[in-house]
Image (tube, rainbow, N blue to C red):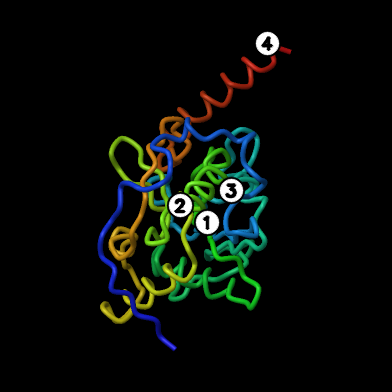
Amino acid sequence: MRLRCGRGRRSYSGLVPTHLDSLHDDSLPDGCADSAGRFDAIIVAGGRGSRLGGVDKAAVVIGDTTLLDRALAAVAGAAQVAVVGRDLRCSVSEFPSDGGPVAGIAAGLSALNRDDAPAVVVLLAVDIPDAASAVPLLCEALRWADNDVDGACLTRDGHPQWLVSALRCDRLNRALNRLRDDAGSMRNQSVRRLAGMLTLHLLPDTARASEDVDTWADHARIQARIDRDRFDREAVT
């Protein structure tokens, strides 16, 4: 049965704190999400990496770890994880192939559908190396949000980071079905259009946890920061 959604507004207010800094990891239950403390995750790993010279982003190493392994570590508390892409290491294949991130999200959500599925799913692009700190905060923000809020996502420098988000699964499913009905296909649909069908709470990313590796310049900058942080930790110990 197709579910239709009539929502089209975004929410920038609610019962959640304004800044990530106002939530603390040590105060959160492990993987806090739905009332049972459970969430699933979709890692979108099907991009072409054109601004990286066509390399497989999931295999790019940063901080001695591949981006895919860092993304998997960020959602280690998930009940189940769907890694969507073209690579053989991905658990779910894009359909249609090279269909874009929305097609990947739809494939991932379909793969996670089961009787005991959690009520919340985390969406994460594979090229976000520092997302681990944001995942529990987004889940906690959604847990305390009003029921008419469909999800929570980070915003950096005034731009929503749709692929660093926690969403209610039923609301995401409705929005995907509405988008499919409106557009006729998931191919090359924008995440912005999908997000416009959801009521989302935006949390400013003051820690820049949503920075992505889109170019080699991004890679060099983030790698340098990781090296500095490692040096500082070693200096303390």
* Mark nearer the N terminus (1 vs 2): 1
Residue under numbered circle 4 = 235
**Looking at the picture, how far across and down is residue 165, in whole percent?**
45, 52
Mark 4 element type: helix
Furthest-right residue in this view: 237
The residue located at (64%, 55%) in the rendering is: 37
Mark 3 element type: helix
- Residue type, label 1: Val
* Mark nearer the N terminus (3 vs 2): 3
**Looking at the picture, how far across and down is residue 20, in whole percent?**
46, 35
Pointers 1 and 4 in contact (CB under 8 A)?
no
Up/down of 164 relative to 8, above or below: above
* Mark nearer the N terminus (4 vs 2): 2
Front in this rendered view, residue 226 or 4: 4
Q: Is residue 134 left or right of residue 101?
A: right
Identify the disc placed on residue 122: 1
Pointers 1 and 2 in contact (CB under 8 A)?
yes
Q: Residues within 10 Å of mark 4 (few under 14, many from 20)?
A: few
Mark 1 element type: strand
Separation (CA) of disc 1 from disc 2 = 6 Å
Residue depth check, mark 4 versus mark 2: number of the one nearer the observer: 2
- Residue type, label 2: Ser
Separation (CA) of disc 3 from disc 4 = 27 Å
Separation (CA) of disc 3 from disc 2 = 13 Å
Residue depth check, mark 1 versus mark 4: number of the one nearer the observer: 1
- Residue type, label 3: Ala
